[in-house]
Image (tube, rainbow, N blue to C red):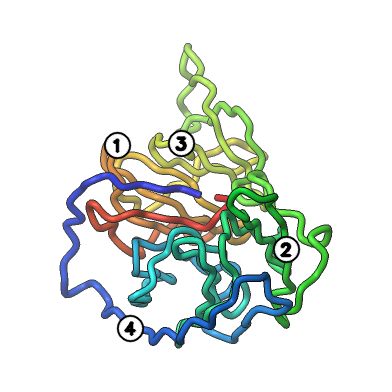
Amino acid sequence: MLVFATGCRAGADDEMVPPTRTITASPSPPTVTAPTRVPVGHGKVSTSSVVWAQENTLHVGARRFDLSPRRVDSFVVVRGGVFFIDRGAVWFTDLVRVRDTGLRGVTRLTTTRDHSAMRVELSAGSGPSSVHAYNVLDGASTSPGNATPATTADRLGTSVQVRLAPERSDLNPATPAPAAQARLGPGQFGVVGGDGEPLMAFVSATKVRVPLAGVVGDGFELVRWTTGSTFFGLARAGAKPLATISCDLETRRCTTLGRVVAGRLLVFESGT
């Protein structure tokens, strides 16, 4: 999970910011034990959606949803909705309403690589911690053994060092370019700049750069590959978070989905 509370000015044109939709929260039932079933839904969110949050505002693509009075401390994306932690309690939203799952004392949420199951880690204060798991298609509890969390490599790709080929084939520099840390995606592309360096994309087999239009900022932090040719992450201006951007290497274009609001806690999906 990436968490930032750094101050910066977004500089976005208010007329370009989509309206925020307020979602009504359902009352909280007085539950103290882990339930045998959690809510599920069929909202307009998929496991390849670009999702991020700042306090009570959930961003899905370029859309914004107001979850007040709830806030988002951590979350996972599943088919049809988002599970999120608010002060140790887990809630579910299908982007229409917010429902209480009955889970309390939760310290961590994760999903499997295929997002079919959610793993929930609970702390019982001075007592032993426990782990529970749920099938996110029907909400039924399942064995934690069926909910192995996705790894960093599943989300970011394989970590490698590469020397990118010159952008012009007629150049043959006497000093080869230094090796750069990169991530190879699940398809034919890779990305340099996953740790605050300027964003560069390349073809994995040839190490030839892929020019990208629409890149903002002077630094980038990769959050997740969504397909073999698309990914999203955090654009930076210096050391400050600037905006969430999504890039398509087939069309060679990046899109700014939302500016980061200065001074507000910034959260990406748990495990990224």
Which comes sooner in the sequence, label 4 or label 3? 4
Count of number-bearing discs:
4
The reply to whether the C-beta atoms of the residues labelled 4 and 3 are less than 8 Å apart is no
Tell me how far mark 2 sits from mark 3, CA to CA. Answer: 33 Å
Q: What x and y, as percent, mark residue 158?
A: 66, 40
Residue at x 45%, y 41% (from the top left corner): 200
The amino acid pointed to by label 1 is Ala
Look at mark 1 in the image and give the residue it sits on: 239
Looking at the rendered structure, the secondary structure element under dot 3 is loop
Q: Nearer the viewer, mark 1 or mark 4?
A: 4
Tell me how far mark 1 sits from mark 2, CA to CA. Answer: 38 Å
Residue 142, located in which quarter of the rendered image?
bottom right
Looking at the rendered structure, the secondary structure element under dot 1 is loop
Q: Nearer the viewer, mark 2 or mark 3?
A: 2
Which comes sooner in the sequence, label 1 or label 2? 2
Q: Relative to 18, is 204 above or below?
A: above
The amino acid pointed to by label 3 is Asp
Look at mark 3 in the image and give the residue it sits on: 195
Residue at x 73%, y 65% (from the top left corner): 133
Which comes sooner in the sequence, label 2 or label 4? 4
Task: In this rendered view, identify the residue nearer to me: 187 or 193.
Answer: 193
The amino acid pointed to by label 4 is Thr
Residue at x 36%, y 54% (from the top left corner): 266
